[in-house]
């Protein structure tokens, strides 16, 4: 899914507004940031663990997106946008106790994917870092037991 510059700006605006809302709360809190893209209405909604809406906007390209795999495409776009914000330092100073996550949720508020995990010095951007780890550990253990 390719977004127009205007729609990319809307996604960025929702993320920045939700970050701003969290920073306004000031005192450290235990929370994650949930992002809910709604295919039927094209809406992107950001909210905290208590379901308090932090920001929302309608993304025109999402309205009745008909190519299938909507949540997968939304996940890719949101992960990329969060990565860009993280690189520019926009996530620094969030009053959230670590570890905290940016989580993609469906319209039933069920977690679909972890978009970004922030935990002191650990930053996981996607599952690619862990793919194949089980096989490598199994091979290592097998070799260790054979010796």
Image (tube, rainbow, N blue to C red):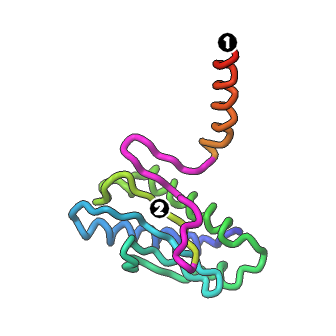
Query: Is any atom of residue 40 visible in this view?
Result: yes
Q: Nearer the viewer, residue 147 or 17?
A: 147
Quarter of the image that includes the N terminus: bottom right
Q: Which mark is residue 131?
A: none
Query: Is any atom of residue 6 visible in this view?
Result: no
Circle 2 SS class? strand
Q: Which mark is residue 147?
A: 1
User: Which residue is at 67% across, 66% downward?
Assistant: 73
Circle 1 SS class? loop
The residue that disc 2 covers is 102
User: Which residue is at 68% across, 39% downward?
Assistant: 132
Q: Find residue 116 and report its horizontal and vertical position in percent.
A: 50, 55
97 sits left or right of 133 in the view = left
Q: Find residue 147 and report its horizontal and vertical position in percent.
A: 67, 12
Q: Nearer the viewer, residue 127 or 80?
A: 127
User: Which residue is at 46% across, 57% downward?
Assistant: 85
For this orientation, the residue located farthest to the top is 147
Q: Find residue 78 and report its horizontal and vertical position in percent.
A: 56, 64
54 sits left or right of 37 in the view = left
Q: Which residues are magenta?
A: 107-127
The residues tagged by marks 2 and 1 sit, at their Cα atoms, a distance apart of 44 Å
């Amino acid at each position: 899914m390719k977004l127009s510059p205007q729609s990319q700006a809307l996604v960025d605006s929702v993320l920045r507004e939700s970050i701003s809302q969290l920073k306004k709360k000031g005192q450290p809190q235990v929370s994650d940031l949930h992002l809910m893209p709604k295919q039927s209405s094209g809406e992107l909604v950001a909210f905290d663990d208590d379901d308090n809406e932090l920001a929302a906007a309608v993304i025109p390209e999402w309205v009745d997106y008909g190519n299938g795999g909507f949540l997968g495409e939304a996940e890719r776009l949101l992960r990329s946008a969060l990565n860009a914000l993280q690189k520019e330092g926009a996530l620094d100073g969030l009053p959230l106790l670590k570890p905290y996550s940016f989580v993609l949720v469906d319209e039933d508020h069920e977690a679909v994917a972890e978009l970004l995990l922030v935990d002191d010095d650990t930053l996981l951007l996607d599952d690619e870092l862990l793919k194949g780890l089980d096989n490598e550990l199994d091979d290592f253990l097998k070799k260790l037991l054979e010796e």
